[in-house]
Image: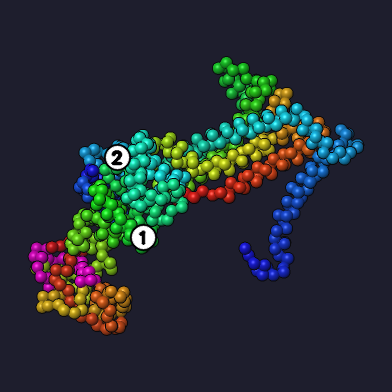
């Protein structure tokens, strides 16, 4: 049980800085997911917490201890790797017991812990087998078991599900969530998959270019993305982001195509600048809408029927900006149609074009 | 398997394999069969008369105490050479595997000895350890070791073992480092998190995982010590003093070309042939057993 505190953490490889100052506090028992595109530094950050990468600047504490100078083994952590990293020459039992043996824990205690972990993870039948005789999901579970038996203060997961097929991934995702809740161990989980991020984490940290763009609960990140990057990264299909001008009074925006939309809550002082106007595809409706809702008209280009939803790709005006709408159910329409869309005022997002920061 | 129909009845496939087959026939099969035939003959020292004696040459070998001594000497020699060459290479590879900066330079330098011809390597060691001229011999004298491998059989043996092992270290190093680098990094990291220090990691994770390579190298090194060290021994000791460094392959040369006992020498090469065939079979068995890392 421990909290993790990162204070001004930076990492450089020579002159290239990959982590550009991360400050955050992960509470005891919390499940934090680091999500971001590949190359954003998320694995590096996790490996710095694990002690597998040196910290260039700043401080990382686990519990009450600053761990900057501690070896990975002294940090009281357990890590699950993307490729599981099971020892191929040892049986499942030996794999789980390896770390405990090194810690010189008595044999009967080791046995008790391994049996208990095997029970939780339903691996009892496989304890004598070498990893190569197990399926992907079972190997994943052994890797989890190896982490559990150590009874660490912190679990670190480095994209543990990305080598599994889609169906198994959903199942293991649930198992990890349940396990973390049962054990209540502080966990940091790295993924590039936003569904994993949204479903697993108590909080997510959206990382981009070595900077934490936003740290918040999944719903906060979805409803109030702090930056254009977060807005575009979280959500599928991703948010429509359009260039627009905010008028001097901050009361209305004019889209590149010419459409003018007045804002329900004027932004006042922040007026008179270029902005990025964002609306999620699922918040665009072609039916309903009251007097207060904002309106757009879409020239339909491509239609994707997903069964549950229909994705409509089109442009604003004849050759304007591209836009996607996600409409519920199956829709009959054809390319070339003009679709009237409306959206609730509260579902629009405005970002400063220069800084990418959220306005209002 | 390619189907026959791909080639039709053309002679092209035969032409394509012909060079390899011709080379094998001329340089391997023919000399080998000559040796087999010769081992059944008894020839006088002047080459004037030849008698077909069936297996008498082999029977002589089987009862010859000197031959058994040579056998024991060769076993000691090969085990020492393989052990030292592999041990050294393993340590060097384990170190090289851990460094990042300048790794390429370090590795390139370590590979050089392999490019040195055996006789040149032998000459090099003879110079360094020459009892009157050699710098190492001088240094050993200073610390109180009376070095003279021209008179002292054990010292001569030590010298040829060192020279032979030195040349083979580079080869072993290459294979060991390749094997170590093919172990996924995350396995080593997992062991580090599990609390294993570098030494513990080496013995519990790295070494077990490179066992197939170690087996393979063991066979290669034994074959090397049995056959390819002729040049070194010839340059350093000529099998002396008093046959102290005469191993099987050197005895074949000595008995055949110096002692002119062609039949007995041929019989010895047949025995060596059987040994190398056996070793090759073992080697192929292990080379096919690939490791699965993940």
Residue at x-position 63% and y-position 27%: B159
Report x, y in % for residue B21.
73, 55
Residue at x-position 48% and y-position 47%: B182
Can residue A5 be seen here? The reply is no
- Examine the image and state in which quarter residue B85 appears: top right
Q: CA distance from mark 2 to mark 1?
A: 31 Å
Report x, y in % for residue A342.
18, 76
Foreground tag (2 vs 1): 1
- Seen from the viewer's position, the closer of residues A4 and A249 is A4
Residue at x-position 26% and y-position 77%: A329
Using a 10 Å C-alpha cutoff, classify the residue at mark 2 as few (fewer than 14 neighbours), some (14 to 19) or many (20 or more). Answer: many
Chain letter belonging to callout 2: A
- Seen from the viewer's position, the closer of residues B246 and A249 is B246
- The residue identified by callout 2 is A75
Highlighted range, magenta: A262-283
- Seen from the viewer's position, the closer of residues B273 and A134 is A134
- Seen from the viewer's position, the closer of residues A151 and B61 is A151
- The residue identified by callout 1 is A168
Using a 10 Å C-alpha cutoff, classify the residue at mark 1 as few (fewer than 14 neighbours), some (14 to 19) or many (20 or more). Answer: some
B89 relative to B47 in the view: left or right: left
A217 relative to B230 in the view: left or right: left
SS at badge 1: helix
- Mark sitting earlier along the chain (2/1): 2
Report x, y in % for residue A150.
32, 42
Can residue A134 be seen here? The reply is yes
Residue sitting farthest toward the top: B144
């Amino acid at each position: 049980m421990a909290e993790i505190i990162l204070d001004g953490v930076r990492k450089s490889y020579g002159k290239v800085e990959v982590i550009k100052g991360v400050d955050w506090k992960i509470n005891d028992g919390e499940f934090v997911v680091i999500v971001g595109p590949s190359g954003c530094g998320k694995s590096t950050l996790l490996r710095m917490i694990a002690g597998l990468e040196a910290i260039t600047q700043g401080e990382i504490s686990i519990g009450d201890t600053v761990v900057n100078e501690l070896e990975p083994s002294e940090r009281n952590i357990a890590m699950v790797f993307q490729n599981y990293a099971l020892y191929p020459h040892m049986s499942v039992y030996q794999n789980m017991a390896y770390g405990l043996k090194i810690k010189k824990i008595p044999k009967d205690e080791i046995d008790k812990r391994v049996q208990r972990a095997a029970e939780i993870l339903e691996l009892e039948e496989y304890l004598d087998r070498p990893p190569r005789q197990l399926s992907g999901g079972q190997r994943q579970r052994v890797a989890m078991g190896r982490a559990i038996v150590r009874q660490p203060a912190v679990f670190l997961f480095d994209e543990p599900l990305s080598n599994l097929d889609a169906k198994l991934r959903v199942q293991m995702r649930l198992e990890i969530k349940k396990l973390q809740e049962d054990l209540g161990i502080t966990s940091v989980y790295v993924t590039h998959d936003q569904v994993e991020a949204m479903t697993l984490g108590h909080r997510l940290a959206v990382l981009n270019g070595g900077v934490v763009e936003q740290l918040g609960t999944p719903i906060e990140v979805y409803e109030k993305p702090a930056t254009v990057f977060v807005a575009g990264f979280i959500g599928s299909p991703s948010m429509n982001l359009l260039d627009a001008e905010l008028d001097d009074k901050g009361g209305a925006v004019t889209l590149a195509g010419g459409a003018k939309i007045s804002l329900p809550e004027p932004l006042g002082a922040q007026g008179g600048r270029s902005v990025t106007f964002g609306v999620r595809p699922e918040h665009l409706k072609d039916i309903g809408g009251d007097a207060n809702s904002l309106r757009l008209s879409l020239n339909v280009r491509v239609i994707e029927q997903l069964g549950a939803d229909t994705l409509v790709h089109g442009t604003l005006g004849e050759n304007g900006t591209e836009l996607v709408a996600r409409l519920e159910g199956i829709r009959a329409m054809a390319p070339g149609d003009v679709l009237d869309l409306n959206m609730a005022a509260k579902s629009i997002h405005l970002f400063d074009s220069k800084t990418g920061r959220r306005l209002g | 398997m390619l189907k026959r129909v791909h080639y039709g009845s053309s002679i092209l496939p035969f032409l394509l394999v012909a060079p390899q087959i011709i080379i094998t026939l001329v340089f391997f099969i023919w000399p080998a069969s000559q040796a087999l035939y010769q081992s059944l003959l008894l020839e006088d020292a002047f080459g004037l008369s030849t008698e077909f004696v069936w297996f008498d040459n082999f029977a002589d070998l089987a009862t010859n105490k000197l031959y058994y001594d040579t056998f024991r000497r060769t076993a000691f020699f090969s085990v020492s050479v393989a052990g030292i060459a592999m041990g050294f290479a393993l340590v060097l590879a384990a170190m090289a595997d851990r460094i990042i900066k300048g790794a390429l330079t370090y590795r390139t330098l370590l590979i050089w000895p392999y490019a040195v011809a055996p006789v040149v390597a032998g000459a090099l060691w003879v110079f360094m350890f020459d009892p009157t001229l050699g710098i190492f011999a001088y240094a050993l004298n200073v610390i109180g070791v009376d070095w003279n491998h021209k008179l002292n059989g054990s010292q001569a043996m030590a010298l040829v073992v060192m020279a032979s092992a030195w040349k083979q270290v580079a080869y072993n190093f290459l294979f060991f480092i390749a094997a170590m680098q093919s172990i996924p990094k995350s396995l080593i990291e997992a062991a580090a998190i599990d609390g294993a220090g570098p030494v513990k990691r080496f013995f519990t994770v790295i070494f077990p995982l490179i066992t197939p390579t170690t087996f393979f190298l063991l066979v290669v090194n034994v074959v090397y010590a049995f056959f390819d060290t002729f040049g070194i021994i010839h340059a350093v000791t000529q099998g002396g003093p008093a046959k102290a460094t005469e191993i099987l392959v050197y005895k074949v040369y000595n008995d055949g070309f110096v002692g002119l006992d062609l039949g007995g020498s041929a019989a010895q090469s047949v025995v060596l042939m059987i040994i190398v065939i056996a070793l090759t079979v073992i080697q192929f068995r292990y080379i096919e057993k690939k490791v699965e890392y993940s």
